[in-house]
Amino acid sequence: MDTTPPSRAPCALPLILDEYVMGNFVRNFILVLLSLTVLFLIFTFFELIGDIIKYRTPLVTVGEYLMNLIPFILYNVTPVCSLVAVLITFGTLNRTSELTAMKATGTSLYRMVTPVLLIATLISAALFAFDEFYLPDANRKQEALLSTIKGKPAQTFLRPDRKWMSGQSGGSTQPTRIFYYQFFGPDTNVFANLTVFEFEPGTFRLTRRIFATSTRWDENEHTWIFENGWQRSFGDDSVSDYQTFAHATFPEIRERPSYFKKEDRQSQQMSFTELRTYIHDLSQSGFDTMRLRVQLNRKLAYPLVTLVMALIAIPFSLQAGKRGSIAGMSAAVGLAIAYWVIAGITENLGNVNSLPAVLAAWSPDILFACAGGYLLLRTPT
């Protein structure tokens, strides 16, 4: 007689547990994501009520703006949703003693959290793809609609690296101006490849065109300094005057730097590939692209925040049985806030060339991933 005990299916139980843990995490993640999105939309709507009434914006335009704002919201709240979903999932499993029952089957804690970390990794990859192929276009649309709602000057959003913007209204006797530029640095108040078109009021006939490879604001003189360019004046049917210059000022151009700075989110309106090409073009022209290079690296580092948040949340969610779920959740949320503070500090240090762009973007991810991994390894399995 064969006395060999029947073989066990070693993979069956872990697969069942995987599905159970992943199902709880995904449900909690979607619930938190929908809740935060709805709250964000409600607060945004009430924040815009004043502008909607002031400029008599049609509700159709407002609704279209909110719809195009949803992708931006999803992209920005996903890491927080990952954090809260992990806290809820493992906090609940710990409080109901289901984690203890799972450990009794011989399954280690690390094996239990693996499905959640895998899902968080997939979400991180999806965030990068989302930002590369869809989000920039949605950001351009919602930025254009927001400009309409807030009554801002007419401008283009289709190509953030080729910007058109109307000038201030000068009345019936002053020429109408349109600005066209490749880049504007809001910190340095410098334009790259700026062209100013002047039109005769009322007839919209081109009367003058000014071009400069670099244009900077002189705070002492309160005027723009145009460098390495030319100006061309037009008569009725032909060019009436053409002059080149190394340095020139045009006091009649009254638009100050603040006129061009309103909620400029240029890097968010480009994909990783577009932003990299844009930085390459500006670098060849000799412009400082440090801020943009920090944002380029952030496009790679930010999606991984979802995984980092999940890693940080796991050890704290397991403290529910010892100090209560509120204590564990409070500590994890506090740590998440610390992450955003440190990320803001390192990003600003990178913007002013105090840190290399790579370190400015990746330091928070590396630091908190190491902290989360250390805390997880110290958690009893």
Image (tube, rainbow, N blue to C red):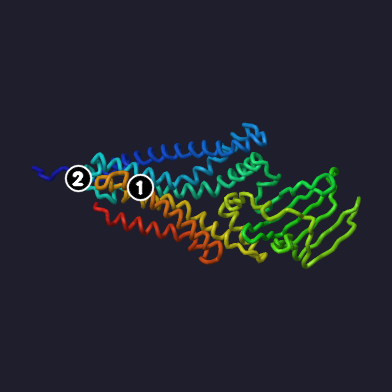
Residue at 69% over, 62% down: 219
Which x, y percent locates residue 342? 45, 58
Residue at 45% over, 61% down: 363
Comparing 1 with 266, the one in front is: 266
- Type of residue at label 2? Ala
Which x, y percent locates residue 206? 84, 50
Label annotation for residue 330: 1
Residue at 67% over, 36% down: 55
Q: Is residue 153 left or right of residue 17?
A: right
Comparing 196 with 157, the one in front is: 196
Q: Is residue 117 left or right of residue 259?
A: left
Secondary element under disc 2, as helix, strand or loop, is: helix
Q: Would you identify the image quadrant in which residue 240 lies?
A: bottom right
- Type of residue at label 1? Ser
Residue bearing mark 2: 104
Q: Is residue 200 left or right of residue 338?
A: right
Residue occupying the far front of the picture: 220
- Local packing at callout 2 (Cα closer than 10 Å; few below 14, some 14-19, many 20+) is few
